[in-house]
Image (tube, grey):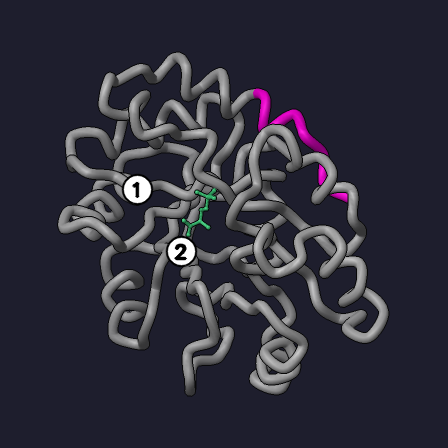
Amino acid sequence: MSAAPPSGNDLSLDEILGLAPVIPVLIIEDVAYAVPLGRALVAGGLPVLEITLRTPVAMDCLERMAGEVEGGVVGAGTVLNPAMRRAAAAAGARFCVSPGLIEGETAGERAPLLPGIATATELIAGLAAGFTNFKLFPANVVGGIEALKAFASPFQQARFCPTGGVNAANAADYLALPNVVCVGGSWVAPAEAIRAGDWGRITALAREAAALGAG
Ligand code: 3PG
């Protein structure tokens, strides 16, 4: 689980999602935080890093982390349309995450996409578009563990990364499900720890999260 990821930009989404049980979902307010934050998480055993495109500096942070955080596999989150995906890939994103399905977008090879779904109808549409990996979002609102159990039988080819309300208290329960490959969450990088530059705390949180096993 915590083995060093291969170098280069050649990882499939399956490979990326298998690198660690938890993908930190990062909201970064200042570009100066990007590299030390990324290094703190990688040091704790979480190499897959999702930078949400929600702040004015997010794309700069992505570029800096992708270029300077050794051992990190950096991707973009909150990708809402094809233009954001293209921009993220150009900035060095090795994967993209969206809260929903983006019309016309497919899994792709460059910066492969992990789309969000919340219902069976969206899952059917995502499978028809060629996706097999999905973010269940917002996981705790749309049925959480019970929804994932219910999806397992009719959607045997689907694998999930539940995100939204996942935290240290419930992550292990999600990860115990056979159709969950990893979980996403912001709890490993609290805003106040980032602002305080408390990288030691973030590494400790990452270490605890990295010790969780996937089902
Ligand atoms: C998000 O998009 O904000 C993620 O789902 C993270 O959710 P969380 O803050 O509940 O972990």
Nearer the camera: disc 2 or disc 1: 1
The location of residue 86, given as percent across then percent down, is 28, 70
As for residue 211 lying within the magenta part, the answer is yes
Q: Residue at image x 60%, y 31%?
A: 2
- Quarter in which the C terminus is drawn: top right
Query: What numbered label is drawn on residue 27?
Result: 1
Q: Residues within 10 Å of mark 2 (few under 14, many from 20)?
A: many
The one of 148 and 201 positioned closer to us in this rendering? 148
Specify the amino acid type for callout 1: Ile
The one of 185 and 146 positioned closer to us in this rendering? 146
In the image, residue 168 above or below residue 89: above
Q: Residue at image x 67%, y 58%?
A: 143
As for residue 155 lying within the magenta part, the answer is no
In the image, residue 209 above or below residue 95: above
Q: Residue at image x 43%, y 58%?
A: 95
Specify the amino acid type for callout 2: Arg
Residue that lies at the very extreme toward the right in this rendered image: 153
Which SS class for mark 2?
loop
The location of residue 128, given as percent across then percent down, is 62, 86
- Quarter in which the N terminus is drawn: top right
Establish whether ligand 1 lies closer than 8 Å to the Cβ of label 1.
Answer: yes
Q: Which residues are magenta?
A: 208-215
What is the distance, in whole Å, between disc 2 and disc 1 at their CAs? 18 Å
- Residue under label 2, please give it: 94
